[in-house]
Amino acid sequence: MVETEKIKYVYLLGIGGIGMSALARYFSFAGKQVSGYDKTPSPLTDELIAEGIPVHFNEDLTISPKLEEREDTLVIFTPAVPEHFGELKWLRANSFTIAKRSEVLGSLSRNKNCIAVAGTHGKTSVTTMTAYLLRESHIDCIAFMGGLSRNYGTNLLLPANNSKVMVAEADEFDRSFLRLFPEMAVITWMDPDHLDIYGTAGHLVEAFATFTGQINAGGVLLYRKGVAIDRNWNKKIRYFTYSVSEKADFKAENITVTEGAYRFDLHSPFGTIHGITLHYPGLMNVENLTAAMALALLNGVTQEEILASVPNYKGVERRFDIRYKSATTVYIDDYGHHPRELEATIRSVRHLYPGRKITGIFQPHLFTRTRDFVDGFAESLDLLDEALVMEIYPAREEPIPGVDAGMILDKMKLKSKRRCSAADFTAILDDYQIDILLTLGAGDIDRLVNPIVAYLKEKNND
């Protein structure tokens, strides 16, 4: 376990990542001297610098932690930082205390009532919704979120009272979630993903089984009805299910949508809450909220507090994020990067805006994921009316011969499809009569969001 109480300095390699920046903010609030490195500037690094946290963008050993401060320094890194990176090699060679982000998060959770949100889809939304419901109740919480809450403008919540409840996004990538030993957990989905790490879907399921086994005795696992959970994974905990379509312990019922708002009832072991109103769009977000409300109720949030707070929930950046809306055009940005996520988003748009034309711009994320799920990507994108597919965002990977955006396009049945790049997207959009526009992906497609908003405003004379 990483000791964090006595350290004075925290240095983060990859500080601009969503999870890393939350840790940077946490340690800064805790009075540590925090600094870090990232490969490129971003809105997140701009925010950190504005908050007084120094960030540099070029490999520079002179800015690395000082040798004389070695005993008081904690270095945190992410798997996205390559092993050959000079600063990391130097820090290791000089015996600094170095830990992965997941190790540090696990250490911070040890003396808390930890709620860990796991699953291959929906983690960030459920984490942020759960944190919001707890924060707006008498319970309160500390929360490490994998996205920027629109209610609070941050990915870190610190409790106003002495709450010991901690909400943490439990990422299955690199088996990071196995560093957590929660009191409560949720598993949203368990679809095959990260096969570059696990090799097979079976090994991924084994990791979720191990994670379930780490829930403390007397604790709770909440899972989406239909996910193949074996209750023998941990016989010392209680199990609950949630759903929007099947009979479950926590079920959203009587769902209607009016002018973009969802209204529904929640059936639960605590009774039925009538007339819940969610203004954040997307049917999958009704399902995500069902999980969050279940966790809130299990932690002592009252039905009255839920009814009062849900209508004011504003969502998460890049999760069904409506960035522009006019009388004729809607633009939605979403982080979806797995076929199941693309399908859920596109179907939610169809449900919300029936009969309208949907144009989607998708940036595949990782060569291995594209190779492993090319058929699924093609099927999901075929749900669009018009599709534009960008080149693959490589992240940590080297190219794989023959794996590119063309693989997906070749499998698609949709007639209106084309390959595109970030450099020429505005010229390409001129070829389309935009009705509903989606940008989809987990790479750097987010850098197109503001230019697209500006383009649409100019085109619509806003």
Image (cartoon, helix red, strand yellow):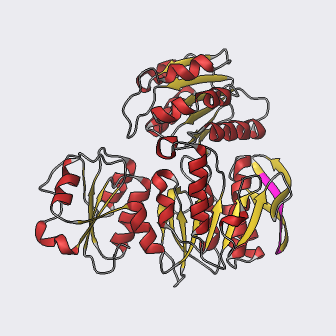
Foreground residue among 398 and 213 = 213
In the displayed orientation, state which residue is furthest to the bottom: 162
Magenta-drawn stretch, dominant element (helix, strand or loop): strand
Q: Is residue 275 above or below residue 434?
A: below
- Does the stretch in magenta take in 264? yes
Q: Is residue 142 above or below residue 346?
A: below
Q: Position of residue 257 (x, y in %)?
A: 81, 48
In the displayed orientation, state which residue is furthest to the right: 254
Foreground residue among 388 and 392 = 392
Q: Which residues make up the magenta segment?
A: 262-270
Left or right, 50 with reference to 147: left
Taking the spot 57% from the left edge, 50% from the top edge, the residue there is: 204
Q: Position of residue 156 (x, y in %)?
A: 47, 65
Query: Which quadrant is the N terminus positioned in?
Result: bottom left
Q: Position of residue 151 (x, y in %)?
A: 57, 61
Q: Is residue 373 above or below residue 243?
A: above
Query: Can residue 372 be seen in the rendering of this structure?
Result: yes
Query: Can residue 454 be seen in the rendering of this structure?
Result: no
Q: Quadrant of residue 429?
A: top right
- Does the stretch in magenta take in 220? no
Query: Which quadrant is the C terminus positioned in?
Result: top right
Number of numbered discs on residues: 0
Q: Position of residue 363 (x, y in %)?
A: 51, 31
Q: Quadrant of residue 235?
A: bottom right
Left or right, 141 with reference to 313: left
Q: Quadrant of residue 74?
A: bottom left
Q: Is residue 339 above or below residue 156?
A: above
